[in-house]
Amino acid sequence: MVSGCPITQVGAGNFTFLASLAELGPLQDNGGPTQTHALVPPSDMIDGADPIAGCPNNHGLLATDQRGAPRIAGARCDIGAVEFGASLTGVVFASGFEQGEP
C-alpha cells in the first residue's frame, strides 16, 4: 500500500505491469493539457486494462485519452494517460499545429 492510497487487485494476475522504466518514454508534451510518459512497446501496460471493466473512471467509461485521442487503439485500453497507437490526426494543439499519422 502506498501511503494513503490502497491498491485493490481485481481478478487474476499481479501488480507487476511496469517491469522497467524502459517501457516509458520521457516526460514530454505528447499532446493534451499536461506532460505525460508515452508507453514504449512491448510494455505490459499496452492493452493492459481490465477486459471486462473497460476504461472506467469516476464518471463512467473513458472514450478518449487525456489528449482527446480514442481511448481504445488495440484490444483493450492502455494503462496510463496516453493510449499507445491512437491517431491524433486532426487534433489541433494550442501551438496551432496538427499531429499527423504516426
Image (spheres, helix red, strand yellow):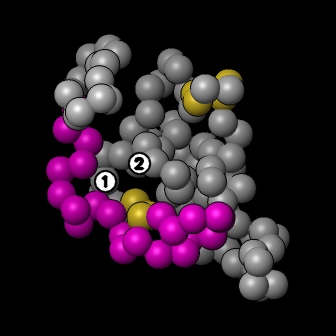
Pick whichever, 85 or 20, lies toward us.
Answer: 20
Mark 2 touching mark 1, by CB under 8 A? Answer: yes
Q: Image quadrant of residue 2?
A: top left
Image spot of residue 42 (x, y percent): 30, 57
| Disc 1: CA contacts within 10 A as few (<14), some (14-19) or many (>=20) | some
Q: Residue at x 63, y 69 (%)?
A: 31
Q: Residue at x 31, y 53 (%)?
A: 43
Which residue is identified by label 2? 46
Image spot of residue 65 (x, y percent): 62, 50
| Disc 2: CA contacts within 10 A as few (<14), some (14-19) or many (>=20) | many
Which residue is identified by label 1? 43
Which amino acid is tagged 2? Ile
As measured in the structure, the alpha-carbon distance from the residue carrying label 2 to the one carrying label 1 is 6 Å
Residues shaded magenta: 15-36
Q: Is residue 101 magenta?
A: no
In the rendered view, does 69 fall on the left or right side of 48?
right
Q: Outermost residue, top direction?
A: 11
Label at residue 19: none
Q: Residue at x 30, y 46 (%)?
A: 44
Image spot of residue 78 (x, y percent): 47, 44
Which amino acid is tagged 1? Ser
